[in-house]
Amino acid sequence: MLINKKHINLIMKDRVLRYIVTSQPTIEGIIDYGEVIIEPGLLEDGKLVDGEAFQIVLEKLVKNKKWKNAPLSFCVPDSFVTIREQLVPKGLTKEETKSYINMELEESIRLPFSNPVIDFVIVSEEKDQSKILIFAYPKQKINEFLQIFEKVGLKPKVADLGSLSLYRLYYQFDLPNEKEDLLLVQWGKDATVLTAFSDNKPIFTRYIKSALSRSTWSWSDHEAELVWTGAEEDIEQAIADQLTTIERFMDFYQYSVMDGNDQITKILLSGDFPYMERIELLMKERFDIKIESMSRLEEKLKHPAKYADVMGLAIKSKNK
């Protein structure tokens, strides 16, 4: 029996690298998983601050795991991602659509950075136009990571978004309702990412840097992960502030993005922040909608819930 070549799936956070190795793009195909803690100052808000030190961390991991020449899928850091809705002429091929988008950059399509990498999906067809969602991220930032991946012996093949990876897993478990407006909350130690999905498409996203000091997260051998070592009241205040931010995001989505026609009908909570059960309880008290949590799906995941986004990345090729 032939054994498929292992495929590496990697998500990069400011303080941790998480990986899943698969022999095939399914949950059952997972043959290894784990995380590597990164010292403060290598990555900040997903940006490379100390590329040489980051490369050393990755080199060591590739060597120890014998990943040299393995294909790699990775998620673009969330802080890079910009989503825009745009109308384009109907009937264009994919390449023609990309050419049209590039032509409209700096004119009708405004982005917070120049020289972007562009991808898109068609949302709907109208009389003589197609409505598309544009996903853009700065090419220079992506290239910095690609160069390091190649230097350490990995073969980057797929770049994806963390929110799309997580939603892919949610969709595979057949959890979406027929008509729902979902708020995906990726609540992490270094940042929270809010992404609104409608008709199975992401239409609005926001990256929120954590107000908590990064130096107050320390490695615990007992817990086998980064734990909060600061004052309890600081983390309680951070949770309360974040819930207020989520509430404002939901209001903005309803009244500004959807013109009052639709509102968030469900929240999917995921991430590696501690006290997730408490956060889920506070959400249920505050929001009169269904709250779904990845931590309650660990039996289906067969792995810790904090790996959900990497798992969604790992099954990508199966769902193409």
Image (spheres, rainbow, N blue to C red):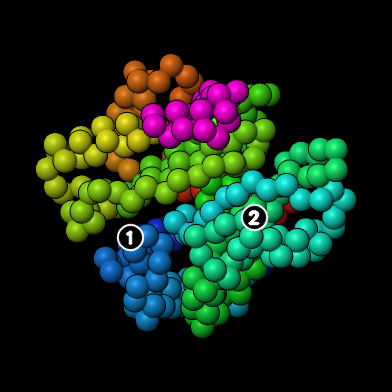
Is residue 99 rendered to the left or right of residue 296? right
The part of the image, by quadrant, that contains residue 21 is: bottom right
* Residue 164 spot, x, y in % from top left: 58, 47
Q: Name the residue under label 2.
A: 108
Q: Which of 228 and 240 is in front in this view?
A: 240
Kind of element beneath mark 1: loop
Residue found 52% across the figure and 56% down from its top:
81
Residue found 68% across the figure and 61% down from its top:
104
Give the quarter of the figure containing the N terminus: bottom right
Q: Which amino acid does label 2 sit on?
A: Ser
> Residue 40: within the magenta?
no
Q: Nearer the viewer, residue 203 or 162?
A: 203
Q: Residue furthest front?
A: 107
The numbered disc on residue 158 is: none
Is residue 222 rendered to the left or right of residue 303? left
Precedes in sequence: disc 2 or disc 1: 1
Residue found 58% across the figure and 30% down from its top:
258
Q: Mark 1 points at which residue?
A: 15
Q: Nearer the viewer, residue 38 or 264?
A: 264
Kind of element beneath mark 2: loop
The part of the image, by quadrant, that contains residue 202 is: top right
